[in-house]
Image (cartoon, helix red, strand yellow):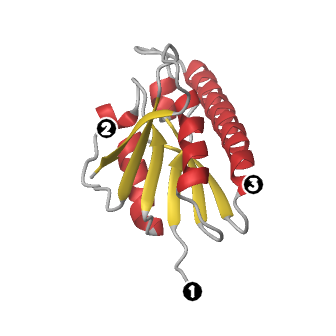
Amino acid sequence: MALHQRIIVVVEDEEVARTALQWAVHNIFRNGDFITLLHVFQPTTSLLPKNTITPSAKKRSKVSASAKERERLTRLKGFQLALSFKDLCNKIPEAKVDIIVTEGEEGPTIASLAKEIGASALILGLHDGSFLYRARWGDEQLNCRVLAIKQQHRHLPEKGFSHVQVVR
């Protein structure tokens, strides 16, 4: 009996992220694999306007309530996005799909979760704003294969993927 893989798919509101998942559905995933759809959003403190000055407790309370509401809405949007990705996983018989929506810095958060669940692979769509280009890993390291799928440019005649980069 073959061992089931534990794979993390990074969920982003980018077309190439969906393309990466579609590629993985056709080329990587097997029956019974454990798939974690992971959406990481920036900490709510980074969602607050810069230089927010709140001299009174009443104003601080309003800012705090508004930050909590922004976090709630951001988390909800991330979960809805992950649910749309989950629909693409329905083609994999007996796959076990989890959704995790969490707050944090992308690099360290993803690396920590990959280590925690013992992921064998991390799949993501590679785009200009991809966290791989700007990740601050801290003490965390990725101890799994990284499959970064880059979508072909639209002006090229062939459909499909331009290439797959394996980063270690």
Q: Residue at x 38, y 35 (%)?
A: 131
> Mark 1: which amino acid?
Met
Distance from disc 1 to disc 3, alpha carbons, whole Å, reads: 23 Å
Tag 3: Cα neighbours inside 10 Å, few (<14), some, or many (≥20)? few
Distance from disc 2 to disc 3, alpha carbons, whole Å, reads: 31 Å
Relative to 158, is 145 above or below? below
**In this rendering, which labeled residue sits more in front, label 1 or label 2?**
1
Q: In this orientation, which residue lies closer to the viewer: 94 or 135?
A: 94
Disc 1 target residue: 1
Tag 1: Cα neighbours inside 10 Å, few (<14), some, or many (≥20)? few
Q: Secondary structure at mark 2?
A: loop
Q: In this orientation, which residue lies closer to the viewer: 61 or 87?
A: 87
**In this rendering, which labeled residue sits more in front, label 2 or label 3?**
3
Q: Which label was assigned to residue 132? A: none
Q: In this orientation, which residue lies closer to the viewer: 154 or 37?
A: 154
Disc 3 target residue: 90
Disc 2 target residue: 135
Q: Which percent across, then down, holds residue 56?
A: 53, 18
> Mark 2: which amino acid?
Ala
